[in-house]
Image (cartoon, grey):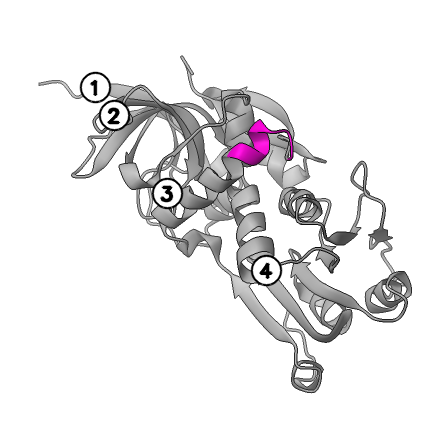
Amino acid sequence: METKQMEAIVLKAAGSPDQALVHRDEPIPVPGPGEVLVEVHAAAVNPLDVVNAAGWLGTPLPTIPGVDFAGVVVSGGAREGREVWGSGPDLGMKRAGTHARFVALPESWLSDKPANLTMAEAAAIGRAHLTAFETVVNLMEVKAGETLLITGGSGMVGRAATAIAHWRGAKTIVAGRHRPEGVEHFIDTSAADGTVDLAEAVLDSTGGRGADLVLDTVGGPQFEPALRSLRFGGRMVGIFSAPEPKISFSPAEIYNRQLRVTGLASVFLDGAYAAGIFDQLKPLFERGILAAPAVRTWPLAQGAEAYQAVMNGSSGIKQVLVPSGG
């Protein structure tokens, strides 16, 4: 019997998007035990997807990339016919991802989509808000009145973290190359000569006390000054960054000031656990506490161009793929 086909993007080789990606038909996946088939109506392109295409994650090839999705359950399980959204571990790496017309997913990985968001907006939430919620709320346990420094704060994770911190009653200081709209406390780190002393600027902004928390989305040369920006007993979480030159700092920066420093590799978050975070995000969007980013949509046939747009920097605009019929 002939295998049913679907439109998909396939990661066939490591390299730039035009070298790595091909648009072609692939077999529709068959759900396994405990899994359902989701028709993908929209799927965001993340920096993680670009890194995956570049070959930095060691993904076995060929594969269908993509980690975020919004769509409809079309076969199997109690959620059949329901609109769902989310972001799963191993998608686009150890199992076929979401940059296709259909994706097979464990039913436990699914969360009901906010009713007030379009499919494209829901897909745009994905990995950025998952990472921001896990770092700011669950790992750092931000409290009302605390000050959170966000390096690379003009990126999607930084913007999501800013909004989530404000919801929790915290103050934010955003450090980045571009000032996001509505940000009150901003440190411009775009100077090529490195003349901006991040730690000094944070101390000035906090009356010499330092930040209670740091979310480091940049790493590299900004790690050490971000560390020095913390008050005694402060907490810091860093997220995945690209391969970078080695940096040096004194462990005394951590030990002598009783700092708590950890990292988050969101690709290893359990899928059901991630769905629980999306369940918590849902009412925040439905009540207007959080808002979806601006979105630009692309057909799957222009997937390489969407990946390239992410590489070039999107200035707060989320690139979202829309499969045919989505």
The answer for how far apart the CA atoms under marks 4 and 3 are is 28 Å
Mark nearer the N terminus (3 vs 2): 2
Q: Quadrant of residue 193?
A: bottom right
Q: Which residue is mark 4?
A: 141
The amino acid pointed to by label 4 is: Glu
The answer for how far apart the CA atoms under marks 1 and 3 are is 21 Å
Q: Is residue 265 left or right of residue 161?
A: left
> Which of label 1 and label 3 is nearer to you?
3
Q: Which residue is mark 3?
A: 91
Q: Which residue is mark 1?
A: 4
The answer for how far apart the CA atoms under marks 4 and 1 are is 47 Å
Q: Which residues are magenta?
A: 283-289
Mark 4 surroundings within 10 Å by alpha-carbon count, few (fewer than 14), some (14 through 19), many (20 or more) = some
Viewer-side residue, 261 vs 40: 261
> Which of label 4 and label 3 is nearer to you?
4
> Which of label 2 and label 4 is nearer to you?
4
Mark 1 surroundings within 10 Å by alpha-carbon count, few (fewer than 14), some (14 through 19), many (20 or more) = few
Mark nearer the N terminus (2 vs 4): 2
| Residue reaching furthest to the left | 1
Q: Secondary structure at mark 3?
A: loop
Viewer-side residue, 298 vs 236: 236
Q: Which residue is mark 2?
A: 28
Mark 2 surroundings within 10 Å by alpha-carbon count, few (fewer than 14), some (14 through 19), many (20 or more) = some
Instruction: Please tell me which residue is depicted at 65% across the width and 69% down the height of the picture.
Output: 235
Mark nearer the N terminus (1 vs 3): 1
Mark nearer the N terminus (4 vs 3): 3
Q: Position of residue 291 (x, y in %)?
A: 64, 31
Which of the numbered marks, if any, corresponds to residue 22?
none
Q: Position of residue 13 (x, y in %)?
A: 41, 43
Q: Quadrant of residue 279?
A: top left
